[in-house]
Amino acid sequence: MESQDLIPSLLSKFNSLTLNTVEWRETKNKIIEELKKQNAFFYDTHHTTFPVNRVGSSFEFNVPENKKGYLKPYRGKKVRAICLYSKKFIRHFAIQDLTNF
């Protein structure tokens, strides 16, 4: 049985809100809570690692079979990378496994 993926609708809502409002922060926390329920992998990386850098942006991709490092557990799977936090040269991402969606 496939689960319902709430992340796209939460990201859509998040991106439509005014930056740094109470509702914006609450929605961001809901996204993080939902990702934690799904055992998403959270990590910091250099701002050039992924093609998205804006908080709330995401993209889906297939992880190559020969991938090493933090994506190694996701080899051969389709995942979604979500930018959750941004500093000058560092981005905080979550990797969501889309296998069950």
Image (cartoon, helix red, strand yellow):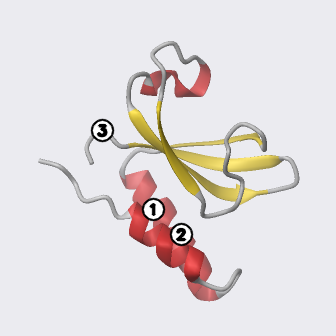
The image position of residue 40, as x and y in percent, is 45, 45
* Residue corresponding to mark 3: 99
* Label 3: few (<14), some (14–19) or many (≥20) C-alpha neighbours in 10 Å: few
- Mark 2 or mark 3: whose residue is earlier in sequence: 2
Please tell me which residue is depicted at 51% across the width and 21% down the height of the picture: 72
The amino acid marked with disc number 1 is Glu
Q: Secondary structure at mark 1?
A: helix
Closer to the camera: disc 2 or disc 3? Answer: 3
The amino acid marked with disc number 2 is Asn
Q: Quadrant of residue 33?
A: bottom left
**Is the residue 5 above or below the residue 22 in the image?**
above
Closer to the camera: disc 3 or disc 1? Answer: 3
The image position of residue 15, as x and y in percent, is 58, 74
Q: How many marks?
A: 3
The answer to whether residue 69 is left or right of residue 41 is right
- Mark 3 or mark 1: whose residue is earlier in sequence: 1
* Residue corresponding to mark 2: 29
